[in-house]
Amino acid sequence: MISIHRLSGFVVLSAIFSFMLLNLTCTNGDKSERPAEQQETNTAATTANEPVKTILFFGNSLTAGYGLDPTESFPSIVQQKIDSAHLTFKVVNAGVSGETSAGGNGRIDWILKQPVDVFVLELGGNDGLRGIPVDETKRNLQAIINKVKNKYPQAKLVLAGMQIPPSMGQEYSLKFRNLFPELAKKNDMTLVPFLLKGVGGIRELNQQDGIHPTATGAKILAQNVWNVMEPVLRKLSDS
């Protein structure tokens, strides 16, 4: 797929993203579109000695698992990995198809009514495809991060990095790509460098819209997240 350090590979993606933009905002037929509190994917057993901690995935259609069965979304697959590792965490999927950073900032207060031990932020992709100024996206994401920190100062934070093709201009694409490592560094967040690594632009790993991963593609997204999240969870379990 695309190296996190290079933009050349995005030429392949430009045509796909430019005419399929509306698919990211479409929620019709999305089998995963349910209220966040109904999307807990935990199957781990709770024991008296090991209370279950909550991992909140907060994102857009990629998190929601657009076009997939809820059990096939990448957060659900992360839950399976957690259970296999015998770690006492439950995943809550708070993904909403079509969500922008502004929309996420508008609903985060309600989502934070539930306990959060690990917060995974996956937003910004729709902003980039719409050409929303990067500084505006950055402000919205920082506002979300601030609200999580204020309510749950002990929560561990994970940020899913995203990239866009150069159809918006190479300068914009580069600035957009860089906002994620900048936010992660500023806020001491664990960074998933590029959530769609190994999936974006690969036809057989995406649905007919060319944007949303298939069930097989979602497994790769889950592995991208698990690679950086597993050490965080093990450290939390040992503390």
Image: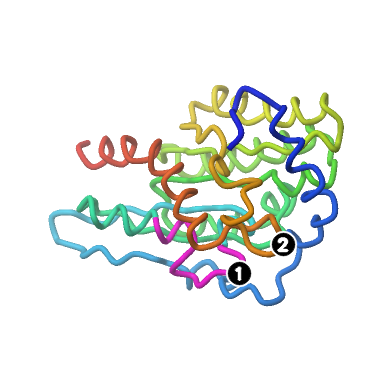
Q: Position of residue 68 (x, y in %)?
A: 55, 69
Q: Residues within 10 Å of mark 1 (few under 14, many from 20)?
A: many
Range of magenta residues: 65-77
Residue 69 inside the magenta-drawn segment: yes
* Residue drawn 31% across the image and 35% down it: 231
Three-letter amino acid code of the residue under disc 1: Gly
* Numbered tag placed on residue 67 in the rendering: 1
Q: CA distance from mark 1 to mark 2?
A: 10 Å
Front residue of this view, candidates 156 and 27:
27
Residue receiving disc 2 = 209
Q: Position of residue 189 (x, y in %)?
A: 49, 31
* Residue drawn 63% across the image and 59% down it: 61
Three-letter amino acid code of the residue under disc 2: Asp
Task: Report the side of 32 relative to 19 (left or right).
Answer: left
Q: Position of residue 44 (x, y in %)?
A: 25, 63
Task: Report the side of 136 relative to 154 (left or right).
Answer: right
Task: Report the side of 77 relative to 176 (left or right).
Answer: left
Quadrant (top left/top right/bottom left/bottom right) for the N terminus: top right
Quadrant (top left/top right/bottom left/bottom right) for the C terminus: top left
